[in-house]
Amino acid sequence: MGKSREQLIADDRPAIDTLIGKKDLVGVEIGTDKGYHALNMVGRLNIKKLYAVDPYISYPASNSNSFEIENEDKAMKLREESAKNLSGYDNIEMLLVTSEKAVSYINIPLDFVYIDGDHRYEMVLKDIQLWYPRVKNGGLIAGHDFKIGESGVIRAVFQFFGDSFKKDGWDWWHLKGEING
């Protein structure tokens, strides 16, 4: 069976390529949706532990072209699909809480954080501010949907990093400790 559109999109995340070859990675994915990107990371990287953080609650879109979860029923269906897709992976732990709550549960230095949750400016900036201190020096903080129509993502990334990040496709990333990294 061929890959779905969502699975193909999950495969196209160039920020993750910066982690290839590194061993025993511990990371966090903010916004797990159906779990395809988490599976992609576990399949491509040497991951010791991946925390998949998503509260699966309804929230508004950041704009008229953006993803949103319109109601709790849709949120629960996404949660069930993600749990099914990620079952059987001992190195993936689903945290069904907000990013703000999850940061207090994970008290270890992280090799990477990948942000692809709520795309509203305030939420993206808050995710970066919460998780950046948890990333090891030389580690990766990255995210998705840095694109036309997602002004909240773009604004938050520029506000926090200035010009100290890279972009390819819809991915943005910063290697902690590097200027213009």
Image (spheres, grey):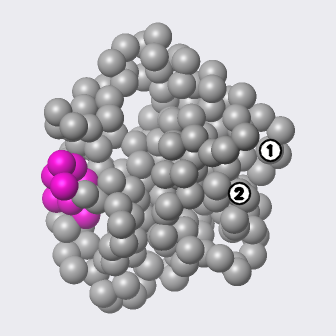
Q: So how many labels did they put on this image?
A: 2
Residue 89 higher or lower than 137, as above or below: above
Q: Residue 175 falls in which quadrant of the image?
A: bottom left
Residue ID at (28%, 81%) = 164
Q: Residue 44 falls in which quadrant of the image?
A: bottom right
Residue ID at (59%, 69%) = 111
Q: Is residue 128 something one can see in this rendering? A: no
Residue bearing mark 1? 89
Q: Dividing the image into 4 quarters, which one contains the C terminus?
A: bottom left
Residue 94 higher or lower than 25, as above or below: above
Mark 2 belongs to which amino acid? Val
Which comes before the other along the chain, label 1 or label 2?
Answer: 2
Residue ID at (55%, 78%) = 18
In reply to whether residue 32 is colored magenta, the answer given is no
At label 1, counting other C-alpha atoms closer than 10 Å, the crowd grade (few under 14, some 14-19, many 20 or more) is few
Residue most toward the front?
A: 1
- The percent position of residue 101, horizontal first and vertical second, equals 47, 38
Residue bearing mark 2? 42
Q: Secondary structure at mark 2?
A: helix
Q: Does 65 sit left or right of 34 as displayed? A: left
Contact flag, marks 1 and 2 (Cβ < 8 Å) = yes
- The percent position of residue 48, horizontal first and vertical second, equals 76, 61
Which SS type dominates the magenta stretch?
Answer: helix
Q: Which residues are magenta?
A: 148-157
The one of 181 and 109 positioned closer to us in this rendering = 181
